[in-house]
Amino acid sequence: MKNQITNALSDFFFEYETPRQVLVRNRRVGVVCRLIQLGVLAYIIGWVFIYEKGYQSTDTAVSSVFTKMKGVGYTNVSGSERVWDVADYVFPPQGDSSFVVMTNYIITEGQKMGTCPELKGKHNCKSNADCEGGSFKRTGHGQMTGVCVESTKTCEVLAWCPVEDDHDIPDPPLLMSAENYTLFIKNSVTFPLFGVTRSNLVEGIDADYIGKCLHDPKKAPLCPIFRLGDIVKLSGFSFETIAKVGGAIGIVVDWTCNLDVDVKHCKPQYNFHGLYGNPDETDKARASVGYNFRYAKHYMENGTQKRTLLKVFGIRFDIIVQSLARKFDIIPTLTAIGSGVGIFGVATVVCDLVLLYLLPKREFYKNMKFKYTDTHAQDPDSEAGSTETEK
């Protein structure tokens, strides 16, 4: 028993097994094998290493975005002059990565709580029977009192009166001056895997440069100051058209960095995409066009609470940060090489299929490739029983 264990350990530690190889001199099989190997080699070098950067590990960034608008607008509606600054036309004003710039509006001033006729088209009536007291209509402005107002042929409602009339949208937009407003974007990204932190205020961008630059895709691609009219144009929209009823634009800050080179080459690229709006006449067929919302400013007048209601049409800007950093890593490199070496086995499988099943001399190649042991003629433990016979 001891000798058997010793022999087994000796065989395990001091012997090496290797498969027998058969050298086949056949031009067709040789050409097929080399073509497959060349294809696999081209795939490994071209696709895995050059295109997919299989020798690098990747990481995405943790990002923070801060924005600031600048610009002043002027309107004169029915003789009422008004100057609009950032606090008036940006929602919300905190400098978020998603915000709205007002470009048009419908204002209803001096509203107070009371009863008044509903807007025409909201709930028309011929008699009080058509106005169910205490009920609401989804598109209405308040609670119906059960009275049909003869002068307007609409139901009377308990609401903020007079009710808003938003049938006629100002055209051209009241705040066309928004085209010349400027947007400042400050973006910082951190790639935690590589311990790299970058800002879009890269080397060479200082206070003097920011004070005089304006973003241009060709002349000033790194300038973080953007003119709204240029953003809308680069997104494929017409400013006057989108300013009338509103819309949405995505600003993509793209950080695609190769950290195998100097980190100063890790710089952002800006792209602009029209998300929704009405850039052409076909959009008018849609159920809902543009972007709008309402907000009210409440005040007291002679002891009565009143409000000024604004229906705001504006451009919603969503700043989206995309990031991907790459750096050399030995582990994905070895993994890519190992998988590539494994794929080389495809050539062997294909060539074996050709040799053993397709060529005219396939029986000859089978006999050369395989050895068969006859285990029935003798006791397998005897010397004679281990005799090998070729077929």
Image (cartoon, rainbow, N blue to C red):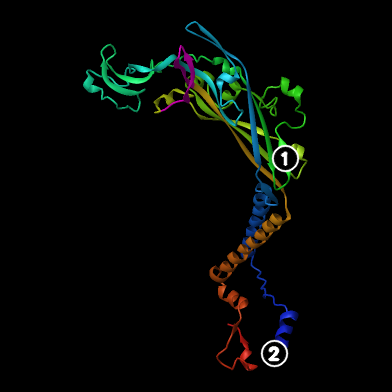
Q: Which circle, 2 or 1, is nearer the viewer?
A: 1
* Magenta span: 288-312
Label 1: which residue? Answer: 197
- What's the residue at 75%, 28% (across, down)? 205
Residue 62, image x and y in percent? 65, 41
- What's the residue at 62%, 66% (across, down)? 348
| Quadrant the C terminus occupies | bottom right
| Quadrant the N terminus occupies | bottom right
Q: Quadrant of residue 339?
A: bottom right
Residue 92, image x and y in percent? 56, 27
Tell me the crowding category of disc 1: few under 14, some 14 to 19, or many 20 or more residues within 10 angstroms, Cα based.
some
Label 2: which residue? Answer: 4
Q: Residue furthest top?
A: 79
Is residue 84 depicted above or below 246 in this figure? above
Is residue 94 depicted above or below 86 in this figure? below
Residue 292, image x and y in percent? 47, 24
Q: Was residue 357 drawn as part of the magenta stretch in this picture?
A: no
